[in-house]
Every structure is written in structure tokens, then in C-alpha cells.
Image (cartoon, grey):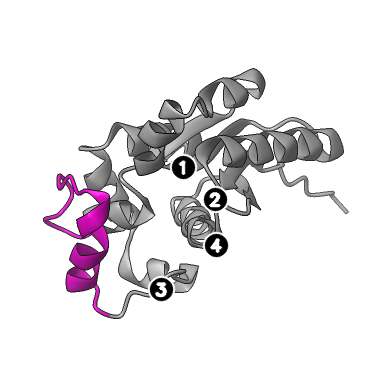
Amino acid sequence: MARISIPRRKRIFVGTEGQSERSFAAWLQSSCDDAGLHVHLDVRVGTGGDSLAIAEYATQEYKKRSSQFGLFGAAAVLLDADRLKEDLAYGRDPRPVLGVVGITPIFLRPTLEGVLVRLHEGQESRDLNTSTVKKVLLNLWPDYKKPCPAIKLQKRFSVKDMRRAAKYDDELKKLFRILGL
């Protein structure tokens, strides 16, 4: 009897701030599966904090998981863009810490909720600030609650929505390149 060899999935490390970003990463995994990509997102969820604290946690987890299971094919960490300016003012830049191990920071503009707004058709080029993003999202998606389960994201959005939004967002383009979408 011939033995069937199944190729290993490309492991991609994804660090997140909290449960909302974890759900988003789970939706990304299902989007990769739907697109026929042979990848596995190894998602590690931090406990929040500023960008540097999240980067330090992600770096620690990346090193630990690499040592346990082998090297990753790629790595990213999802960070809120609205925190970066304040973090930089206090000398808390996450980028050097991430650069040491090769993790790409993906700055969600201004937060994950801003990305969710731009996934809605007709909203993809919208540039929102932190104070209005939640109100705009609730107008588009009245039953949205944080953290939103991945299954709700799967029912509401597709890869097509991400591609449309990525045309106006360099950070989403970077994320797409990392995932192979």
C-alpha cells in the first residue's frame, strides 16, 4: 500500500494584543483555508498593554514556539496604530524589539475596529480617528460586540472585502504578503 505524504503547512506566527485580534486572526486562518493556502497561523494572545509590552510578549512567544516546533515561515504582530504615537513619546517603540527576531509589525488603523469599518463595501478608503471609529462601526454593524467571535467575522466578510480594503491600506497589504493572499 502506497504511503501518502501530506506536506507540512507553512507556519506563520501571529502575535495579538487581545481576544478581538485573536478572532480576527482566526478569521484570517479561515480565509487562507478558503483561498487554498497551505498555512497554519500560530496565534499567541498577549494581555494588552502598550505596543512595546505586546511586542516583548510576542518576541518571547516567538522564540519559545520556534524552539519547541521549529522555525516559522513568517511572523507578524497586530498592533493598534493609535497607540504608537503615544508610545513613541514615552520611548516605548516596539519596532526594534520585533526586528531582532524578524517579526513584522502590522499597525491596524486606528484600531481593529477601523479595519472592520473599512471591510464594509464603500468604506474601504475611510480614514477614521479613535474617537469616532466605534460609532461608525456600530452604524454599519449594529449588533457588533467586542470581542467579536471569528464565526461572525466569517459570516460578514470575505477575502474579497480584505483585498478591497488593502488597496487603501499599506499595513493590510503587508499582512496579505505575509499570509500569501
User: In this view, which residue lies farthest toward the right?
Assistant: 1
Q: Is residue 2 above or below residue 139?
A: above
Q: Quadrant of the C terminus?
A: top left
* Residue in view at x 30 percent, y 80 percent: 143
| Residue beneath disc 1 | 79
Mark closer to the chain start, 2 or 1 = 2
User: In this view, which residue lies farthest toward the front?
Assistant: 90
Asked where in the image residue 166 lies, by quadrant, the reply is: top left
- Taking the image as shown, residue 134 lies to the left or right of residue 146, namely left
- Range of residues picked out in magenta: 120-142
Q: Kindly check if marks 2 and 1 are in contact, taking CB atoms under 8 A apart as contact.
A: yes
Of badges 4 and 3, the one in the foreground is 4
Mark closer to the chain start, 3 or 1 = 1
Q: Kindly check if marks 3 and 2 are in contact, taking CB atoms under 8 A apart as contact.
A: no
Asked where in the image residue 55 lies, by quadrant, the reply is: top right
| Residue beneath disc 4 | 19
Q: Position of residue 18 (x, y in %)?
A: 55, 57
| Residue beneath disc 3 | 152
| Residue beneath disc 2 | 17
Q: Amino acid at mark 4?
A: Gln
Q: Position of residue 38 (x, y in %)?
A: 58, 45
Q: Amino acid at mark 3?
A: Lys
Q: Residues within 10 Å of mark 4 (few under 14, many from 20)?
A: some
SS class, disc 2: loop
Q: Kindly check if marks 4 and 3 are in contact, taking CB atoms under 8 A apart as contact.
A: no
Q: Kindly check if marks 3 and 1 are in contact, taking CB atoms under 8 A apart as contact.
A: no
Q: Kindly check if marks 2 and 4 are in contact, taking CB atoms under 8 A apart as contact.
A: no
Mark closer to the chain start, 3 or 2 = 2
